[in-house]
Amino acid sequence: MSGNFIRAATFHGFQNLVFELGGCPDQFLDEIGLSEAQLRDPEALVPIGSFQAALNLAAEKTATPRFG
């Protein structure tokens, strides 16, 4: 594995917050190339760019600039 990775635990609370803000977390994850299944194991590694993209997308789609 090459590149920069973070633990999936970093996404803890992301889906609930997106939903509370009126977004569709599964759609956001799909758009950035991740699935809910990939985030179930908090020790799983995901590309850090995916986390950054998720925050930016959530900020844009929920009109919550402080998200990203």
Image (cartoon, helix red, strand yellow):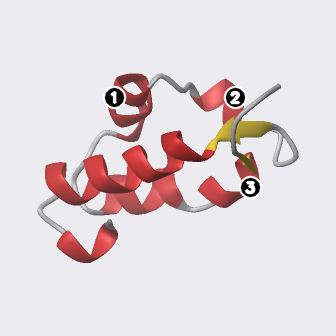
Evaluate if marks 2 and 3 touch, with contact meaning CB atoms under 8 Å apart.
no
Q: Earlier in the sequence, mark 2 or mark 3?
A: 3
Q: Give the secondary structure at mark 3.
A: helix
Single out the residue that lies furthest toward the left.
63
Q: Residue furthest bottom?
A: 66
Mark 1 and mark 2: Cα distance apart in space: 14 Å
Tell me the quarter of the image containing the N terminus: top right
Q: Position of residue 64 (x, y in %)?
A: 19, 69
Q: Amino acid at mark 2?
A: Gln
Residue at 24% across / 60% down in the picture?
Answer: 59
Residue at numbered disc 2 = 38
27 left or right, relative to 36:
left
Q: Amino acid at mark 3?
A: Ala
Classify residue 11 by image quadrant.
Answer: bottom right
Q: Is residue 12 visible?
A: yes
Residue at 32% across, 65% down: 68
**Residue wearing tag 3:** 9
Please give the residue where the numbered disc 1 appears in the rendered image.
27
Disc 1 or 3, which lies upstream in sequence?
A: 3
Q: Residues within 10 Å of mark 3 (few under 14, many from 20)?
A: some
Using the image, determine if residue 13 lies above or below residue 33. Answer: below
Secondary structure of the residue carrying numbered label 1: helix
Nearest the eye: 30 or 53? 53
